[in-house]
Image (cartoon, coloured by chain):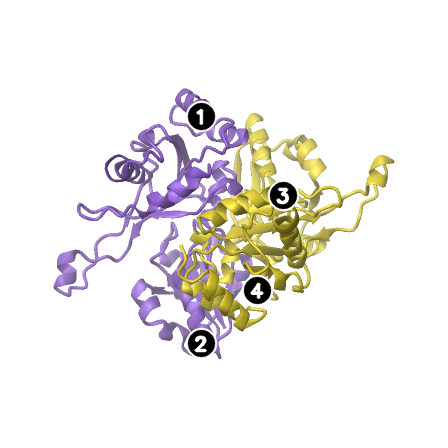
Chain colours: A purple, B yellow
């Protein structure tokens, strides 16, 4: 059996009791390490599980999935995924590959940022489609997220923006020379995301889907003891420092509930500003 | 401290290791029992936790929250929620009430149907807003879900439909006479949901947002060992029998990915029909 085991969001204790049982019994244990990361190192997991864990990077999962699936029709293999197992397309792919090999599969669900974002007090039924924000380069500023945000905004919905992580990336020079030297990991911050969003609105798309005074919420380390939430205008969030990764951002839609305002106010950069923008642009809107 | 502890979706082992630690140590433990239910009884939970659990029904949470919060500034109180703690508005309300009383709060995230629906192979970034379907009465057929579905459909997105559960409901007669006699619990099935959706399209709204040949996916007992998935047209799903609760339904948007088709095909009521409807109405659409 191939088990896809969700690990949740923060640390080793966010695995479920069932997930932990499966990990302890499996013949081999892989940790998918490129779509999201926990806030603890592999060694902490290994010591908690009482066994060794093989890191599965993008190359391994996408090109060497047969190694992961070897003998999984006879023995149990656990493939660990940060968050919920079905958060990323690549895992669906792995299950399809297993099916072709007549390997039974089972997924063990866990928390995902897509629902844990409810910790902000924003109501989950007020969210539209989720988008991703990648690190811009000087000559590559993909703005496809903007059209999705616009679709959500038109019908008044919030947008959860998932922020890029770069793990095991090569510099262009090292890649060109075939040197397997990797850059230090990088994690996009709420401030970087807010700045990129404004750059796209003001210099590339200019359709007025949002602006400097649009309200947004930044979160960091959701589900952990030092979870942090900051609410404010996109302009304010450009200067917000939420500390260590992982970060996410929500751009508010105008279809809001008073409970959302009451809950968010505690996290506002500037409470008076937050209240006045809310009253002007969000309150009672559909 | 008030802990909101997510229990996940299926049974007692879906709690996280951290959640279980908190439950074992808390002074009092409440189980919210009206927005969702686990597939096991309270007694199974109590035996697994090694302690007693107080059922918190809607009346208790909404009208007697002070009892739940009593002394929570000095002792730990665990409030258990099936799925993720922030799935329902009512929990946000409880946290706001705790804040007013200067009681610190922390939530322990867990799996929610909003992301575990990924077990169908449908990509989570292709979902729009989530809607709820309630049991229709002869003279009360709320169709507000339809407008939300229409908003999602217009931009090509899938809609997750959460199905009504009726727990601890009184008959009108018993309510009128003030008799605290409760009806047996009722859980909406995928078939009932599909039939109500067609009724609203064909007799009430008639805007052609979807129809008998629209593709949908029914799921039951997601995350459990006997999870069941059925894919087909809404008409086919009117006759689908997915067994015991809880059920949910996804109405497909036209913005699809080939991987979604490949993954769903295994669950199709009629594979040839599924493939032909897909090719005609979904493939390559935006």
Q: Which residue is mark 2?
A: A100
Report if the CB atoms under discs 3 and 4 are less than 8 Å apart.
no
**Mark positioned earlier in the residue sequence (3 or 4):** 3
Q: Tag 2, which chain?
A: A
Q: Please state the horizontal and vertical placement of residue A75, each as a whole percent of the image.
A: 48, 76
Q: Tell me the mark number nearer the camera, choosing from 1 and 3.
A: 3
Q: Residues within 10 Å of mark 2 (few under 14, many from 20)?
A: few
- Marks 1 and 3 sit apart, C-alpha to C-alpha, by 29 Å
Q: Please state the horizontal and vertical placement of residue A277, each as a whole percent of the image.
A: 41, 24
User: What is the number of the mark on residue B232?
Assistant: 4
- Marks 3 and 2 sit apart, C-alpha to C-alpha, by 42 Å
Badges 4 and 1, same chain: no
Instruction: Tell me, yes or no, if residue B128 can be seen here.
Output: no
Which residue shows up at 23% across the image and 37% down it?
A203
- Marks 3 and 4 sit apart, C-alpha to C-alpha, by 23 Å
Instruction: Tell me, yes or no, if residue A202 can be seen here.
Output: yes
Q: Tag 4, which chain?
A: B
Badges 1 and 3, same chain: no
Q: Residues within 10 Å of mark 3 (few under 14, many from 20)?
A: some
Which residue shows up at 38% across the image and 23% down it?
A270
- Marks 4 and 1 sit apart, C-alpha to C-alpha, by 43 Å
Q: Is residue A171 left or right of residue B72?
A: left
Secondary structure of the residue carrying tag 4 is strand
Q: Which residue is mark 1?
A: A278
Q: Which residue is mark 3?
A: B143
Report if the CB atoms under discs 4 and 1 are less than 8 Å apart.
no
Q: Is residue A99 above or below residue B61?
A: below
Report if the CB atoms under discs 1 and 3 are less than 8 Å apart.
no
């Amino acid at each position: 059996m191939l088990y896809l085991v969700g690990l949740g969001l923060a640390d080793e204790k966010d695995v479920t009791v069932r997930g932990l049982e499966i990990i302890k019994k499996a013949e081999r244990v892989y940790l998918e390490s490129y779509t999201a990361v926990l806030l603890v190192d592999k060694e902490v997991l290994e010591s908690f599980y009482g066994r060794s864990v093989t890191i599965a990077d993008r190359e391994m999962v996408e090109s060497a999935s047969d190694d992961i699936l070897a003998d999984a029709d006879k023995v149990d293999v656990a493939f660990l995924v940060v968050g919920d197992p079905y958060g990323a397309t690549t895992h669906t792919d792995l299950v399809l590959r297993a099916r072709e090999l007549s390997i039974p599969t089972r997924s063990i669900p866990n928390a995902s940022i897509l629902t844990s974002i409810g910790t902000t007090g924003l109501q989950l039924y007020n969210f539209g489609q989720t988008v991703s924000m990648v690190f811009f380069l000087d000559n590559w500023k993909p703005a496809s997220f903007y059209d999705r945000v616009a679709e959500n905004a038109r019908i008044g919905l919030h947008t959860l923006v998932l922020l890029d992580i770069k793990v095991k990336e090569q510099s262009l020079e090292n890649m060109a020379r075939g040197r397997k030297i990797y850059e230090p990991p990088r994690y996009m911050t709420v401030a970087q995301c807010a700045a990129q969003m404004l750059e796209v609105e003001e210099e590339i798309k200019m359709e007025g889907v949002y602006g400097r005074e649009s309200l947004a919420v930044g979160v960091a380390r959701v589900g952990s003891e030092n979870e942090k939430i900051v609410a404010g205008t996109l302009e304010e969030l450009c200067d917000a420092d939420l500390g260590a990764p992982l970060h996410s951002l929500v751009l508010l839609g105008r279809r809001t509930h008073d409970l959302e305002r009451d809950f968010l106010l505690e996290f506002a950069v500037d409470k008076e500003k937050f209240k006045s923008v809310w009253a002007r642009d969000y309150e009672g809107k559909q």
